[in-house]
Image (tube, helix red, strand yellow):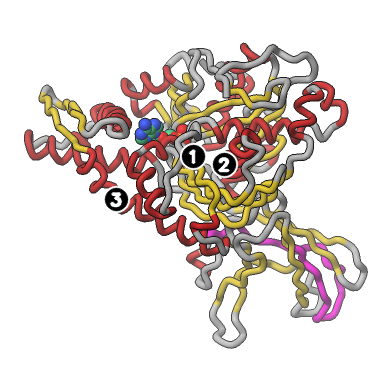
Amino acid sequence: MAPMADRPRPGSGRAVGIDLGTTLSKLACVDDSGRPVLVPNAEGELLTPSIVAFTKTAVLVGRDAKRESLANPARAVLHIKRQMGNPKWRFKVDNETYTPETISALILKKVKQDSEMHIGPIRQAVITVPAYFDDARRKATEDAGAIAGLEVLDIINEPTASALAYGLARPAEDGIYLVYDLGGGTFDVTVIEKRGNEFITLATDGDVELGGKDWDERLVNHLAAKFQQEFKLNIREDPQAMAYLYVSAEEAKKTLSRRDKTTVPVSYKGHWGNYEVAVQEFESLTEDLLAVTQLTTEMVLEEAGITWEGVARIIPTGGSARMPMVQRLLERMAGKPVQGDVPVDETVAAGAAIHAAICAMKSPERIREFGAAAAERLGKVRTVDVAAHALGLIIKDVRTLQYRNDVLIPKNSRLPASVTKTYQTSYDGQEKILLQVVQGDAPNPAANITIGMLEVSGLPPERPAGALVDVTYSYDRKGRIHVTAKDQQTGASVGAEIARQAGLRADQVAEEAKRLSLKTVE
Ligand code: AMP
């Protein structure tokens, strides 16, 4: 994939793909032949650090924000992806409060405006999410796009995007793909079957709190302990010294992907320590993290009903897949070499760009805009995803009288998926039914992710107990939850609204979008 963009296209604005990563973000579009190209930022780089820093006069995103975050860690936000969907997280600076959605929107705004210098106006986007993201995190990502002034055509699972970019570049390679995606903050493993232009996900699993950042943290802990041992000083007390240590540790980690050992300088209160770290030492500090990815990978293969012999291609994705320990793990598990021809950093954004073009081409007037070659190449592509989490309801078990999770849509069901349940009103004149909706398949309610309370309302009044209501729960193609309800007697729709535990209301999204449109991002 060439790291350059083609000429600006006239018309109503581009549809692009954005990989909104924990540590790095990337934007890609397709060229006239339908092939993805990564678009550079204002600094001329293809990867923009997902860091936002607030100075007294400006909002910085990317490389400058990274530098600023070292000088002023309290005024910078890193790894915001980990907070998406967290209703409690807020960032306060200069009498302003930011949600995770708005911080992410600032990152999106920067990659959008920078890319526009190369490819002209951007209107629509597909944004990528880890396959294992739950409903709240998916919604937060869509809302971040809207706040940044983008029309979010779709969200796409990162492993699906990778498989799309990889598979379309190799039309002859059909079969089962295993996408092992270890990024800066999240881990996904997905089994996808490619049949010509079809990409059918068979199973997926992952961890939204496992990624390169955790490898960095182990090294930071190790170095801080060494420094304490030598100088009897606790570097953890100083956020600024820690911010530098994190950067040095990440650099050292990357060096250890190429060399057997490296030296990391650590400085605090006028003391300097230089610590040699060998790759074996680094690997033993982090082997349990790698073991988690192994377990998940084996579980997903089992859920997909596939053995290693059945896997035609392993697609390592995400910057952390560069670590030799990951390469060795994949080869050990698969019992065969992993070909090193996959650009681990680029495939997610590239796949998102392909998906964006496919979505945009659904409106006939835009096919002309993309050109005949792109339409020919992408027109027949189809992707099918699965639900990363089961969808359930908390019910009282009539036998045990304990509350438990009643799974309605099992994990790994093909999307879209829906199920209808019939409920009886339990007293005369009941106009409302309240139900707790969760994601997960653990029987214990507390072990699942609570989505919120579903209120089925507006049932016809003055009915005796025993009136029947059909409630339909569904996952759409992008893994978002929807609920509708119908009164059985009249056949009329009744209200069905989930009061979500997390996330912004539509009016809050609009308000944040207005606030952001007035902000300059540098
Ligand atoms: P991504 O979100 O896919 O861009 O991945 C970013 C993560 O990959 C960060 O944690 C980086 O530190 C990590 N990373 C990038 N290059 C390397 C490398 N050469 N060796 C180890 N980790 C890397």
**Crowd band around label 1 with a 10 angstrom C-alpha radius: few (<14), some (14–19), many (20+):** many
Q: Is residue 201 above or below residue 317?
A: below
User: Circle 1 sits on which residue?
Assistant: 317
- Left/right placement of residue 264 relative to residue 375 reads left
Labels 2 and 3: the sequence-earlier one: 2
Q: In which quadrant of this rendering is ligand 1 seen?
A: top left
Q: Residue 62's spot in the image, x, y percent?
A: 46, 22
Describe the element under mark 1 as helix, strand or loop: strand
The reply to whether the C-beta atoms of the residues labelled 2 and 1 are less than 8 Å apart is: yes
Residue 158's disc number: 2
Where residue 291 sits, quadrant-wise, is bottom left
Where residue 167 sits, quadrant-wise, is top right
Residue type marked 3: Glu
Residue type marked 2: Glu
Looking at the image, which residue is at 48% across and 13% down?
A: 43
How far is mark 1 from mark 3, CA to CA?
19 Å
Looking at the image, which residue is at 55% across and 54% down?
A: 204
Which of the pair 211/371 is nearer the observer? 371
Looking at the image, which residue is at 60% across and 31% down?
A: 350
Residue type marked 1: Thr
- Left/right placement of residue 372 relative to residue 178 reads right
Part of the protein shown in magenta: 449-472
Which of the pair 168/104 is nearer the observer? 168
453 falls in the magenta region: yes
